[in-house]
Amino acid sequence: MKIQPDAAQFPLAFKTVVLAGFKAAKPEVLLNAALMLALLAVPLWAWFADEPFLITLTTRAVIFAIAGVGLNFALGFGGLVSLGHAAFFGLGGYVMGVLAYHAQTYTALLDWPFVIEGSRSMLVIWLVAILLSALLALGIGALSLRTSGVYFIMITLAFAQMLYYFAISWPAYGGEDGLSIYVRNSFPGLNTMAPIQFFAICFVLLILVLLLVKFLARSAFGLALGAARQNEERVQAVGQMPYRLYLIAFMISGSITGLAGALFADLNRFVSPTMFSWQTSGEIMVFVILGGVGRVFGPVAGAALFILLEHSLGGLSDYWHVYLGAILLGVVLFARGGLYGMLTGREAAHD
Amino acid sequence: MSLLKLSHISAFYGASQALFDVHLSLADGQVLALMGRNGMGKSTTVKVICRLLKHRGGTLMFDGQDLGRRPAYQAARLGIGLVPEGRRCFSSLSVRENLIAAARPGDWNLASVAALFPRLDERKDQRAASLSGGEQQMLAIARALMTNPRVLILDEATEGLAPVVRQEIWAAIARLKAETGMAILVIDKSIRELSAVADTAVILDKGRSVWSGDFADLNADITDRYLGV
C-alpha cells in the first residue's frame, strides 16, 4: 500500500518541522544568526533612510569585528594573550597607506633592484597586508612564543610599541601626522566610495573570515591547538609540537587582524601611528572579552556592542571610556564568558 | 632485535635522583610487564621513554635510533604511543575530537578504533569530561592508537576501574597483542591478569631494574621480595 501524503496535514507537518528545527538549534546558532542579521539590517535600513553615517558606523563595527576575530583565534583558541595585535592592525593600515600613496603620487615604491609600483586595487592591498602580517607574526611569534604568561604579553606589547614609535619617526609617510589618501581604493565592479557598497565588501570579508575560523577550529590543527592550551605535555605525547601549533595560530591570527587594518585605513582614507598604539591593542582585546573569549562569533558581538556604546555613551561625555571601563569590569567580574557566555551559557573549555 | 632498549638509564627530578640504573628491552610483537612497588620508578621510566623527562645517564634506543636528543613530540611521531596514568583525556573536546587531534596516518583510524571500543563510538559526540572512568580509559587508549604507534605504553590502565570494565580493558590488550604486531609495555599491579598477556617482565626496585626475564619464570620468591607489601 502506498502512503498518500495528506494535503490537509501538510502545513501542520511543516510547522512541526520548523518548530523542531528551532528547538534543536543551539542558542548559540540563533544568536549568531540574529547578530549577523542585525549587522546587515542596520545599514540596509540606513541606506533606504539615506543615513550614510549609520552605514559607516556599522562598517566600522564590522571591521573591528574582523580584527577581533583575528585576535580571538590566538587568544581564545590558542590561549595566547597578545597585547600587541595593533602591530598587525597598523601594518595592514600602512600597507594600504603606502601602496595607495605611491599610486596617488605616481611614484614607485622601490626603484632598485626592481621596480615596485604602488597600487589602488583593494585585492592587491589585502593580499600584501595579509602576507606581510603573517610574516611579521612569524617574526614576533618566533621570539615571543619562547616565553609564556606575563612575559608573552609584555613582548608582544613591546613589538607593537616599537612599530608605533617607528611610524611616528618615519617622515616619508607622514610621521606623527599620518597619511591621507584622497580616494578609496578600487574593487572590480563596485563603487567603493558608496558607503553601502564598501560595507558589503567588509561584511562579506567578515563572513569569509568567520567561516575560515570555524573550519580551522574544527580541523585537526584547531583541535590539537585547543588541546595544547589545556595540556602541552599530553599534546607532545601524541606527536604534536606545541610551539609550532602556537606559531601557526599566531600567524593566522595576525594576518586576519592585518586585513582588518587595511580595511580600516580604507574606511577612513587615512592612516596614522595611532593604529599601532597600545590603546588599539587594548580595544581589540576589549572586543574579544566583551563578546566572549574563544567563541567564534564573540568578537562580532563585542565589536558591535563597543561601537554601540561608543556612539550612545560618547554623546553623554567626552570621558565615555569611564562608563566603558565600568561595563568591562562588570563583564569580567560577573559574566566571564562575555555576551556569548551570558546569553548562551559558558563553554567548559574557558573556565 | 629489540625495538626499544634502555641501558643504564638514570634520571632526576630536580636534585633528587629517581632512576639509578634501569635496563629494559622490548621486541616487536612482545608484551612486557613493568613491575614494582609504588615509587620505585615505573612511571618515571615511562616518562623517560616518551622524552617527557630527560634522562641524565645511559642510552635510550628506539628502532635503532638514539632518542636521547629528540623532543617528546618526535618520539611520539617515531612510534611511541603513551596511555598516561590517570588517563588525561583532553576534557573539553568530544570523543571524536580527542581522536582527530591525535590522528596520524596508518592502519588505526576512527573506524578501526570504534571496532575495538564500540562504547566509544556510541559516545563519539560526548565531551571527554562527561565520560565514565572506564570510558575515559578506553578513549586514552584509542587516542594513543590513533597516533599509529609501534609500541604502546599503558601506565596503570586498569587502576581504579570497576572489575567489569577492567576485564574489557584487558580483553582489548589481549586483542591488540593477538591481532597486531604491536609491542606493548604495560604497568599494572595485577599479576594474575598480566600473566595472561605478558611475555617478559622487568621489576624495578628503588630506581634499578633488579629482575628481568620471561614472565613465566616469575616465582613467589621474587614477587614476595620485590612486589609484596
Image (cartoon, coloured by chain):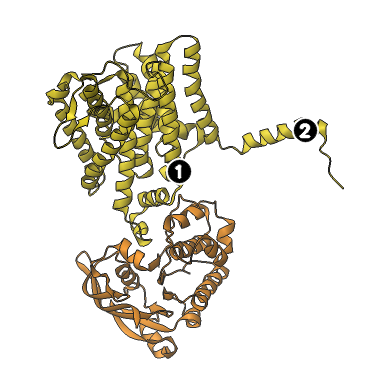
Q: The chain coloured orange carries which letter?
A: B
* Quadrant, the C terminus of chain B: bottom left
Asked whether the residues under marks 1 and 2 belong to the same chain, the reply is: yes
The chain letter under disc 1 is A
Judge whether A197 appears above or below A298 on screen. above
Task: Name the residue nearer the viewer: A164 or B13.
Answer: A164
Q: Quadrant of residue B69?
A: bottom left
Q: Residue furthest right?
A: A1
Pointer 1: residues within 10 angstroms few (<14), some, or many (20+)? Answer: few
Q: CA distance from mark 1 to mark 2?
A: 36 Å
* A123 relative to B199 in the view: left or right: left
Residue A286 pos. (x, y %): 34, 29
Task: Name the residue nearer the viewer: B215 or A60.
Answer: A60
Task: Name the residue nearer the viewer: B143 or A122.
Answer: A122
Task: Residue B31: tell me if it is visible.
Answer: yes
Residue on which disc 1 sits: A215
Mark 1 element type: helix
Residue A265 pos. (x, y %): 29, 23
Q: Quadrant of residue A6?
A: top right
Residue on which disc 2 sits: A10
Q: What is chain A's hue in the picture?
A: yellow
* Quadrant, the N terminus of chain B: bottom left
Judge whether B222 appears above or below A132 on screen. below
Q: Quadrant of residue B147?
A: bottom left
Q: Earlier in the sequence, mark 1 or mark 2?
A: 2
Mark 2 element type: helix
Task: Give the residue type that dot 2 points to.
Answer: Phe
Task: Give the residue type that dot 1 points to.
Answer: Phe
Residue B228 pos. (x, y %): 40, 81
Assess whether mark 2 and mark 1 are in contact (beta carbons under 8 angstroms): no
Please report the residue visible at 42 percent of the width from the left and 23 percent of the height from the top. Answer: A189
Marker disc for residue B79: none
